[in-house]
Image: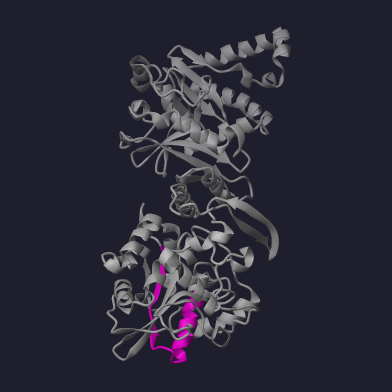
Amino acid sequence: MRQLCEHLLNELISGRLASLLEYIKGDAELNIQIRKNYINVYYKGGNILKINSPKSFDFDKMYYNDYHTISSTEAKKSFDLIHEYKEQQKSLKSLLPHNPQEYFKQAKKAMDKWDVALKDVVQHNEKKEQQAIAIANMADTDYVVLDLEYAVSKQSEFAYDGGDDKKVPRFDIIAIRNGRLFVIELKKGLGATHGKSGIKSHMKCYDHTIGRDNEHFFVKEMQALLKQKQELGLLDKTLTIEDTKPEFIFAFADKKDKDDFEEFAERCFKVGYEGNFIYIGNNHKLTAKMSRRKYYYAERRKQEALYDDKFWGSTPNGGHWTIFKNGQKIKVVKNLPYILHQNYSKENLYVDIREDACQYFKQNNISWWRQQEDDYSPTGHLVSSQIHCLNHLFAIRKDDNAIKQLLKKATGIEFDKILPTTIDKPNDGYIAFEFALDNEQLLGETDEGAKRGAMCTSIDAMIRAQKDDKIWLIPIEWKYTETYKREDKTNRKRFNRYKHLIECSERLKTPTDRISHSVYFFEPNYELMRQTLLCEQLVNQEYAHTFFHINVIPSANTELRNAVEKEFIPMLKEEAKFRIIDPQELLSPIAEDKNYEDLITYLQIRYWKK
């Protein structure tokens, strides 16, 4: 139990230990933590002082020079050495409580040498990191540190019940954020992500201890601890802890000159972690951070769960994924649970559109996503955005009235009529998928193998509509789980291809400094920029009078939505003709339409249900 008795608490607040406490609080290098009826004061990864009572103080003799470097056998034989350290220890403790300045001067001198001797010891450096984090996060940060090194004892009401009777789980940091408790496990670099100190083992320890504490014994203990720390003036009096289950969370710090956060997050997601993260910067501040891949893994888990629940019946999964590096094939990963088997990939499509969609792609020489890389047609990947788009829109591509309702929802414009596509064979629908038209002439895109859906600017879905005497293009960029690294796509060919078009654009603002390496050459903006330029050129060629750009992104994919809202939209001259919309919201006008009852049920189960 992290709590002081009333007597010791009063001595610290207003009694014989009050001046000592104030001195410690005024030293930015020291960190105070309450233990079971005593206080530990930490310094550089060690315990510089233990306060038991106004007359009882401890300083471990192991911190004296050379003591920690000799073996226990040598120590026992070296009576003179032990005696010397005991005398130094006794002399040092005699300085308290009346002379803290001299006490800490001498104690720090001893511990500084100890710290240098252990500079390459991982466990020592981890404790130094913990204490530095505690000092840096006492107020005005995303997370306020309440406790360090919390061990769940065998006598606890929520003792470990995961199969090992001897196990006593220990959690690095307990912190508060917005009234909620967080149980934090620290990770520095990618090294300690497997084995006993790995990701899954920490998750299991939490689930089988604090995570199963439905009576809130742990929360009550932390509430009492917070109250005493506030009484001692260690934490802000406005902090509170709610009676809700604490959240387990990983905190990650990069090693020097590394940028491994996303790799660490991906490793967590792959073993079933579903939470957010904390990032620890060079200043030791705990900063809330969401991985850009969190939504992808959440959706992938959902699709895998649907598969396990026989959503696809007896369709086999275990498909493959080809990995490339610098254009060269590296390896093929097989037996993946989130990819349908190559021979059954059609079943990734809604049953009523399977044959028609495959025939449409074949007749119009359209490339399926990763068709060249994996030899799938269509892809069997369960979180493909191309499949996501077709499953939402293909069934209504010949229903001009339904399309008109969707466009009114997305654009706010009630179009007079929806016009047939002009590039499809046969020309019997109102939505063209993977739209591309005269890209070589209009955009200068001359890449070998270019066709609709591959090696050129393609728009996921294109609709032509008429309002009064004007023809509108409605390009729809469809996203599902995508997020993007900050990868600069600028090269000489791309820069020369799009520079003049950007400078002459009536929709895109020209960057104030330079076009190369600008926001336009980072995804998702790079794709949206090219689609904008293509539509502008089509308007210039009198294919239409104007256009309204729709970007479909699920509302839960906040990382991608934020990127578009903060980076691309501010670069538009006509923001009113661009809209981000959730797919369920887009299809809401036909949600009660009996003609699409089966489609809506399918989409709700597969994609929309939280």
Along the line of sight, the residue nearer the viewer: 275 or 77? 275
Which residue sits at x=57%, y=60%? Answer: 343
Look at the picture and state if 355 lies above or below 293.
Answer: below
In the displayed structure image, the side of residue 198 where residue 178 appears, left or right: left
Look at the picture and state if 36 lies above or below 602.
Answer: above
* Residue 98 in view here: no
**Identity of the residue furthest to the front in this view:** 314
Along the line of sight, the residue nearer the viewer: 111 or 452? 452
* Residue 182, image x, y percentages: 41, 37
Residues in magenta?
Answer: 529-553
Which residue sits at x=29%, y=64%? Answer: 591
* Residue 180, image x, y percentages: 35, 38
* Residue 465 in view here: yes
* Residue 398, image x, y percentages: 37, 77
Inspect the magenta stretch and tell me whether residue 569 lies in it. Answer: no
The colour scheme of the drawn protein is one colour
Quadrant housing residue 187: top right
